[in-house]
Amino acid sequence: MAAPVSDESASEDETGGEIVVTALKRDSTIQKTPITISAVTGEMLTRAGVTDVTGITQAVPNLVFVDGGSDRTRVVIRGIQSVGEPTVGVYYDETAVTGAVSPGNDAGLSTPRLKLFDVQRVEVLRGPQGTLYGSGSMAGTVRILFNKPTQKLEGAVEAEIGSIDGGSSRHDVQGMINVPIISDVLAARLVLFDANSGGFIDNTRLNRKNTGSAHSQGGRFLVRFTPTDSLTIDASANYQKTRGETGQYFLDGPALKNTLFIQMPSVDKSELYNVTARWDLGPVTATAIASYADRKINNTSGDTSQLLLGNLNNPAVCQRLRGNGSPCSPETQATFNAYVQSTTPAAITPRLDTSGPSAELRLSSNGRQFLDWTVGTYYSKRNGDVTNGATMADPLTGELISPEIYLYKRVVQDKLEQIAFFGEGAAHITSKLTFTGGLRYFKYDRSVGGQTLKGFDLLGINVQPYAITSSSDTGWISKFNAAYQANEKILFYASASQGYRPGGVNQVLGLPPEFAPYEADSLWNYEVGLKTSWFNNRLNFNIDAYRIDWDNMQVAGRTSTGPGFSFISNAGAARAQGIEAEFSARPLQGLSFQANASFSSSKLSEDQVSSAIVAAGRKGNRIPFTPKVTMGASADYTAPIANDLNMTAHVDLNHVGQSYSEFNPTNIFRRNLPAYTLTNVRFGIDNESARWGIYVFANNVFNKVTVSYVIQTAATGGNAYAASAAPRTVGLGVRSKF
């Protein structure tokens, strides 16, 4: 451990090619930080054309995004993947963000994807970070750190247009301006953007082409106030609104096509506010953080039409619902068929509103002492309001009817309050040997209430009065780390650390009361690692090996009535283990390479024994959406071609291995997600003195259809909905700075 966390990071050149990170709440170079961490600088993001957090996978081993679109993304590190609260913590600056509370309590599936422009760096910490970062970080933490206001008048603008093979056009315009207001005291920074991802999914039933686009608009406003040399106050406001359609195709049909009866609109609005104050008190630095987040999602999660049409000419259903136990007459059957047809087309349309404050106060020792320490307390309160149901659509256009016509309707209120006290200390036993220990005490209280306002006989849904159920828990988690700095070039480390996430209460239609509550789950992570630097940090090689034991897993189940409504239960255990490696080199001026790989196994170590779970996993089953292999590589080259003109080139590739969508091979909804490799290239010319650049790019050069997300349930009518990266996209971009 070194100095307490600061806001500015040195450039790679200033640190001999290393990146300064603040993952341990203190400044340290990445090669001397004794944890498994990867970092991507803002310059790297720009060179690669990364626009949101899902674009960093090629730079980080064992990081996977289960990507079903802008409003349904799950972050997975080291194969720790399941429904429920996030298993990976995501921070924008000092604010922890989670997904929106949903009808199935699956907040982890809607990770916020704010625009990445004018970014200082992204840090990815692999392995549990529970002592410093809390419940959302049981498998790791992703930190996105934005550039802060400076005492320099400056600005930047970037614009690009592109064309998707077989799809529509796309565009991206973004700009930044930084203004000093009071010399050395006050400055402000404004970022604005407008982007349209373009669409490439065709709905052959409705004859709609190039669906699935997402149009994002928003910005970020930051103010830095430095009244004294020892006190810095940063305030920020982030706003982003994305309108579009869920872009999913049918896995069993022609590539990138579906036959949905409906359109699938989505509106996702995020607001994030933060104030952070840092006060250097001499021997210690005090940091106070206050944040407020508000996320609203109105989306379409499924087409119920085919499921409902399965009741047509079904004598058993007619007898149960219309015949009072006796077979239906031809007239009654015909009347029932007409009723079934009147309920289609229809869509599942959740309306999610999640908001709440969070705060943290911590103290950190200054300078390098025998004992470097950090202590603090954390508080958060999250309120989730959910309105969910099936609503009617126009049979000709598939457009959802407004105002909404509900076939069934239910509401859920979810409240989660957490408080924690934490501390970490690093004892420097010798100049080379350091032992670190950490503890975190946590307490959470959760209450979930809801009612069904309108029933629907075809799905077995009855009107239910308001009911509320609560759960709570307390506990301790710990961390132990030993680091040995053999010399300036070589660092050995070993650690054992815990991670956890809170339990909760299901509010699911038709769920027996005994299955309403579910417990927290937790894991232990054991790892050893080696970091090496050579030739004045021009060559770095890092490798680590880990084993994770995950107990009392939160897993998905389904009720026997209302099969479309999932719930969460605890069952079984899992073991994840693997090896991760990273390599970077700068052999020549202007030339750099990066490469990484992970080889892992994430499997159940015992049966998921619960009569509540349909097609429960068995010992030896792989955890869904967890590839055995991930690989990434990139190369960058800059060379002078004339006075003040440089040629730039960038190429990167990302390989994600094969995985499955469900645990058990006997599950009829288990689908194969084939391995894929994506390749992107960029070529450009930069003018150093005039500070402008122009470039061409091609993403997904080899036009691969990927499967990054699959969902198949009774509610989807048996269809497997899948999501893919965009086909080959070529375009032109310009950028300028002043």
Image (cartoon, rainbow, N blue to C red):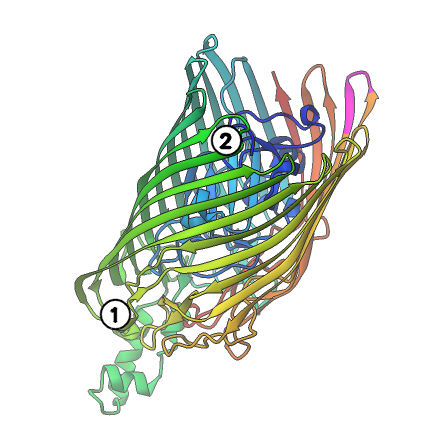
Q: Within 10 Å of the Cα at label 2, are there few (<14), some (14-19), or many (20+) other Cα atoms?
A: many
Q: Which residues are magenta?
A: 642-647
Going by the picture, which residue comes out furthest to the bottom?
Answer: 326
Q: x, y (%) of residue 274? A: 38, 31
Name the dominant secondary structure of the magenta segment: strand
**Distance between the Cα atoms at labels 1 and 2?**
43 Å
Tell me what residue is drawn at x 25 percent, y 74 percent. Answer: 457
Task: Determine the secondary structure under disc 1.
Answer: loop
Taking the image as shown, residue 639 lies to the left or right of residue 46, namely right
Sequence-wise first label, 1 or 2 = 2
Going by the picture, which residue comes out furthest to the front?
Answer: 429
Q: x, y (%) of residue 423? A: 42, 40
Q: Which residue is mark 1?
A: 456
Q: Is residue 333 magenta?
A: no
Which amino acid, mark 1? Phe
Taking the image as shown, residue 188 lies to the left or right of residue 402, namely right
Q: x, y (%) of residue 577? A: 60, 61
Q: Within 10 Å of the Cα at label 1, are there few (<14), some (14-19), or many (20+) other Cα atoms?
A: some
Q: Which residue is mark 2?
A: 193
